[in-house]
Image (tube, helix red, strand yellow):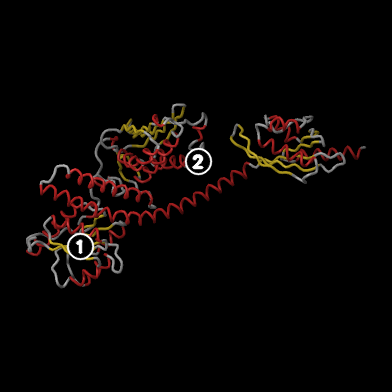
Amino acid sequence: MSDGRAAFDISSAVLNSLVEEVAIIDRAGVVTQVNEAWTRCAGQGCADCFPVGTDLLSALEANAARDPDAAAVLAGVQQVLQGEVDSFEHEYVRVQEDGPRWFNERVAPLRTEGGGAVIARFDITDRKRAEQEREAHRYELGRAVRAATLGQLSGALAHELNQPLTAILANAQVGAAAVERSGASADIAPIFADIVADARRAGHVIQRLRSLLQRHEPKFDVVDLNRIADDALSLSRSELLVRNVRLMKQFAPGVLPVYGDAIELQHLLLNLIVNACEAMAATARAERTLRVATSTRAERARLVIEDNGTGIETGASDKIFEPFYTTKKNGLGLGLSICRSIVTLHGGEIALASGAAGTTVTVELPTVGGGRGTLPASGAPSSEGTGPAADRGNAARG
Amino acid sequence: MNDDAPLVAVVDDEESIRRALLRLLASAHYRAEAFDSAAGFLETLSKRTFECLILDLQMPAMTGLELQQRLHELHVHLPIIVITAYDEPETRARCLALGAERYFCKPVDGHSLIESVQELIESRRGRDRGDVAPPAPLV
């Protein structure tokens, strides 16, 4: 008797020493013994750690209709109890107060005369997060490779498109001059003028895209936030058109000088614009409105991107800038974290407010010279082709 | 066309660009001749007096940069306007170092191009007459 008691104490001690939550069920599926980890977990409100005496099979069955993981575990436990399989394993996720946690649940037959099974549950959240981070790094690496490829391709693409554009522009300008000289029909001159304007616009778009896709080291200069916002909107034009998004532009008058990297700031704008457009997917097409506003206040330049799309759920807006946090089905949760890095690099702040009426992202950056006035001669956006002059080549005049 | 009008060379392997630039130069009352290769231009160099060269960079066989280098070796001092569809800061620097006086990215604005041709030819003619200071050194 004393030997049996000692053996039982040792078994309990072993069970309680385990960090995993362990439960033992009899052949009918009733929980007969649990360890301290299991009890502690149940005490913290875990709905998967049933107390001693629970008919586990019935409890799982009750949950199976709304919880596919409960259904999977139920099937596994039944198979083990009936000797159909030697062990069963299932991974599942449970959203808790501190975020999602992943578990691995293993069921093995209890090798006694009476039969039954041992259920052990491991918290594998750390491993899962590490896997996700590795996956994200792989994605980032892939993205970097794709970006490098795109950078190279963009050069080839710029060449192939700029060649015919050169001929189109020169021909249209010759045509315009010929029409002017000959005094031909007044209908023709605006046609040439439109061709010239569109060829120039196409050239600028190619140049801006190329600047964006090329690898570059951050280059800080005095840049006009209004111009950068305009450039980003011009690059997003087709995105807005395709998604039927109405643009409401409210810019501070004149130039809005900030000290920054024009390309990085354009990335920031593009990211926020695309996010806003995606958030409006469920909004009625006729109502989709993107507001992009700039202003100055207390020596800060303020940029506001506002959509009337699906807001972000309450509580999520605190975490939204953290890496790998996402509310999108297929998102990796890096876009806004990159946005925050860009803003931080510029000594600014980014904030997000979200509700049923949509989401507003506010970026504040330190201004140069109180946020008013003109840019110094070298202060045009560093990416060539974004300047107001029709031709970019004059940068290298002798 | 006035036979005394300055003669401008266009070297570009793209036919549509050659045609368009010839029209552009003609409309600004320049005489112009176009070449689809650097070699073709070099062959003609001894037979014509060009006053300006509009030069593309990316060309098969001899590139625009190589042509510039060759002209440098031959001591041919001709105002060169580079036009390129593949702008790179290093290329730009090399072109200017080899003596190009203007550097334009395609699609180049016709008015700016003609303005440059005019400026460079006038400056060259003035210098030949000794009445104008040479252009400021390139940076």
Cα separation between marks 1 and 2: 52 Å
**Could you say which disc has been placed on residue A186 in the image?**
none
Q: Position of residue A2 (x, y in %)?
A: 91, 38
Q: Position of residue A247 (x, y in %)?
A: 34, 33
The quadrant the N terminus of chain A occupies is top right
| Residue named by callout 1 | B10
- What is the secondary structure assignment of the residue under circle 2? loop
- Which residue is found at the position 17% from the left and 52% from the top? A174
| Residue named by callout 2 | A333
Judge by depth and name the residue closer to the eye, B55 or A184. Answer: A184
Q: Amino acid at mark 1?
A: Val
- Please tell me whether residue B58 is drawn above or below residue A25 in the rendered image: below
- Which residue is found at the position 59% from the left and 47% from the top? A131
Judge by depth and name the residue closer to the eye, B80 or A351. Answer: B80
Asked if the residue at tag 2 contacts the one at tag 1, i.e. Cβ–Cβ closer than 8 Å, the answer is: no
Dividing the picture into quarters, in which one does residue A157 lie?
bottom left
Q: Position of residue A5 (x, y in %)?
A: 88, 37
Q: Amino acid at mark 2?
A: Gly
